[in-house]
Image (cartoon, rainbow, N blue to C red):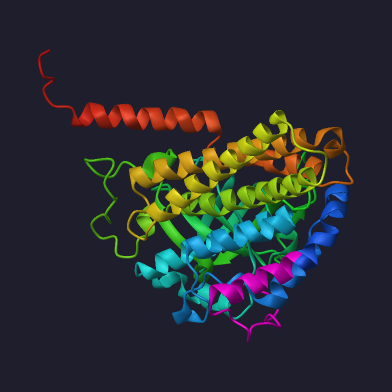
Amino acid sequence: MTTAGPMPGQERIPQTSAELSSIVRSIGEAAAPHAARHDREASFVAEGYEAIRACGYGLIAVPRELGGAGFDLAAVCQAEAVLARYCANTALAIAMHQHTVLSLAWRWRLGDRAVEHTLRRIARGELILSSSGTADLDNPGITAEPVDGGLLVSGRKRFCSGVPGADVIATIARVDDGERGSTATVLIPTSDPGTKVIPDWDAMGMRGSGSNSVSFSEVLVPDANVLQFGPRVSSPRRYRHGEPNAHSPVTPRPGDTNGSERLPALHVALAVIASVYLGSAGAMRDKALSIAATQTAPDLVRQRIAGEMTAEFRSGRWALDALLAQTTDFSLGSEDQFITTMLAKRQVVLSAIRVVELSMELLGSRSYLRDLPFEQALRDVRAGITHPLPPERTLIEVGVSALRYFASSATEVPAR
């Protein structure tokens, strides 16, 4: 792989939460003055990424044993929420790197040494990742043909957030070996001649996140950059239905020594992504309350709006806190953790949208003008409903799970 070289701030690996907070604030202060311009131009948040490289923010989730800072999911989510208060687009773009690193670190802790080389390179400041997952592992949009020394990859992926500032794209490919369908996680340099970033990101919100499409034309991915093989599956339920009791943690299958059979990357990703939306909404709530508090004496309507804003924000924060509390190395991949993830993500996103709407209602017509950040924030947080699963689909999945669980665990119904 070709890389952008070591980060200038590599020697300043954060050791404490306070040091991490200081790094995040410095990135935010570099990104914030340019946020509105990038939104208007639909241009990439380059200043934020320059600060990310300079501060070593990309290595915070790499285990300490491999040269990183060793921060866990909760710490990364808190950092992303704070960064989003300054520039939600920078936070969302780099979230795609952070959640991928967290997933690789999870695999490493469970014994998968195939990911160690990549994690060490991230710790050295050599790699910033962009990622693009899929809700349909049967048809991820990328095909891979086994060849001597690796895979020959072709296809196209959409919504590769942060790709203009990334060194490598991490994505899922469907491997066709002529015998047994499987999937593989592949790392592809953005500088590869067969890789083309397509500047097609022109969206309603998160316009600075650089969520472009990327096409691959017979890109040779060496074996060292193929991080995971697994049986081909037809739905995300793969990581949730391995046990007789669907609410118990999924245990490794026979012969599964590295945890790759149950890599629930989406479970990790959604916690990090949800934190971005909650952070952005929190900033709008605080700004709206600060402005409203200096205006004329509040009436009952404005007081109620302020109360509802606080209730919505705290509901989202409590949902995220519950998700983080339940997410451990051993709960990842279980039915219960999947349900908690999806419900928490749904609550956070819907609360974030409602908080920004209420902020605008509290301030009135002025909030609709672009000299204040509310109009952009509303468009940005609405992007949250597009991450899988959508809010209504989430309720269906939860309902199916609940009914199936009670049907499978029901005993003789007592007479009434």
Residue 260's image quarter? bottom left
- Residue 379: tell me if it is visible: yes
Left or right of residue 341: residue 376: right
Q: Looking at this rendering, what residue extends furthest in the front direction?
A: 297
Question: What residue sits 78% from the left and 42% below the top?
Answer: 292
* Vertical side of 118 occupied by 300: above or below: above
Image quadrant holding the C terminus, namely top left
Question: What residue sits 34% from the left and 54% below the top?
Answer: 331
Stretch in magenta = 1-28
Q: Position of residue 121 (x, y in %)?
A: 57, 77
Left or right of residue 164: residue 176: left
Question: What residue sits 28% from the left and 42% below the top?
Answer: 247
Question: What residue sits 48% from the left and 56% below the top?
Answer: 184
Q: Position of residue 328 (x, y in %)?
A: 37, 58
Q: Position of residue 35 (x, y in %)?
A: 81, 55
Q: Is residue 22 magenta?
A: yes
Q: Looking at this rendering, what residue extends furthest in the top direction?
A: 416
- Residue 386: tell me if it is visible: no
